[in-house]
Image (cartoon, grey):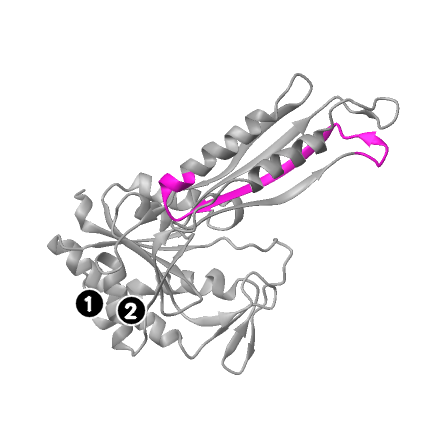
């Protein structure tokens, strides 16, 4: 199949909530309340409706439209669903990812990330009787000190965070084990890879005859950047302007990271308004939904037209 003849519409179907969460939808006026109602249930409903809307309106898009509900967008999912879709369909020539909140947002820059789970193992021992033996916690703390000394660029924005630090057995035991979970992010892949090298160096320096360091990659999302004034991002901005909305361009980590990093014309757009994302009292406002749906239809049709013409 010709790569230039398929447009992807993607909405992730995973949420941050456990299977035991009560996802009963409650309506209060023009708001719907439920865990995951905006992130990302409404988007899944929207992409599912596209074909029906086209049929009812008598519209035939100018290229094939591939609709997917994919997993792995949240948490440590590592965008595995979107990777699988794009890998399996080399004919994709453009992609629109959808998020339920933030109508008016247009993401054309994918924030890349590398996440590490690091385990330090040492000999342990009694804090008095075995004093002098290396502590896994002390080794981990020294690594954090080294990480704090890394000079991070503000442009391109690049960040580093130790989100979890745990270990030890008791107050009078030399810690035999410690664990760090490290999050590195950047809007530029080159800057991210530079930071990864610096962190790897700090971890390697912590190894000794008695302290072993085990590193596991638990997240690896590619960074990418496409111009905001061409491709899907430009189409989305122009569609929003038709409804009197000013587009807000911003970097984020979304399903669009995958096609953006491969230079496939792509963007992630918002559908509605709401709040309390990733909380059990999450909500969406219904008033903007018709505008969000109309935006989706316009962006899909115009992107399809440009894709067919070879100018997306």
Residue 182 inside the magenta-drawn segment? yes
- Quarter of the image that includes the N terminus: top left
Residue 179: % across, % down: 66, 35
- Point out residue 297 in the picture as x, y percentages from the top left corner: 27, 67
Q: Which residues are magenta?
A: 169-192
- The residue that label 2 is drawn on is 53
Secondary structure under tag 2 reads helix
Q: Quadrant of the C terminus?
A: bottom left
Q: CA distance from mark 1 to mark 2?
A: 8 Å
Q: From the viewer's perspective, is residue 239 above or below residue 6?
A: below
Q: State the image quarter where residue 289 is shown.
A: bottom left
- Mark 1 sits on what residue? 59
- Image x and y of residue 68, in percent: 36, 52
Vertical arrangement, residue 189 with respect to residue 120, above or below: below
Q: Are marks 1 and 2 in contact (CB under 8 Å)?
A: yes
Checking the image for residue 273, the label placed there is: none
Residue at 37 percent across and 41 percent down: it is 189
Asked if residue 225 is positioned above or below residue 285 in the image, the reply reads: above
In the rendered structure, the answer to whether residue 21 lies left or right of residue 127 reads: left
């Amino acid at each position: 199949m010709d790569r230039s003849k398929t447009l992807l519409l993607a909405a992730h179907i995973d949420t941050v909530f456990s299977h035991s969460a009560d996802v009963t939808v409650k309506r209060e006026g023009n708001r719907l309340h439920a865990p995951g109602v905006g992130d990302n249930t409404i988007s899944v409903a929207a992409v599912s409706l596209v074909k029906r809307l086209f049929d009812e309106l008598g519209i035939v898009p100018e290229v094939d439209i591939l609709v997917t509900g994919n997993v792995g967008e949240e948490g440590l999912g590592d965008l595995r669903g979107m990777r699988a879709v794009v890998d399996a369909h080399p004919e994709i020539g453009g992609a629109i990812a959808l998020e339920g909140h933030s109508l008016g947002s247009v993401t054309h820059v994918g924030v890349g990330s590398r996440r590490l789970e690091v385990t330090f193992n040492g000999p342990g021992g009694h804090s008095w009787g075995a004093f002098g033996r290396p502590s896994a916690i002390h080794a981990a703390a020294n690594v954090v000190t080294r990480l704090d000394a890394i000079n991070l660029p503000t442009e391109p924005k690049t960040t580093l965070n130790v989100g979890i630090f745990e270990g030890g057995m008791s107050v009078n035991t030399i810690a035999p084990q410690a664990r760090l979970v490290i999050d590195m992010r950047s809007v530029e892949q080159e800057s991210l890879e530079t930071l990864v090298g610096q962190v790897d160096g700090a971890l390697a320096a912590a190894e000794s005859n008695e302290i072993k360091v085990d590193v596991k990659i638990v997240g690896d999302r590619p960074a990418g950047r496409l111009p905001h004034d061409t491709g899907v991002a430009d189409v989305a901005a122009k569609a929003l302007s038709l409804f009197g909305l000013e587009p807000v361009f911003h970097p984020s980590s979304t399903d669009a990271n995958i096609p953006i990093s491969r230079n496939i014309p792509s963007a992630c757009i918002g559908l509605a308004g709401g709040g309390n994302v990733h909380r059990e009292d999450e909500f969406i406002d219904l008033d903007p939904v018709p505008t969000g749906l109309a935006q989706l239809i316009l962006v899909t049709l115009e992107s399809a037209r440009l894709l067919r013409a070879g100018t997306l």
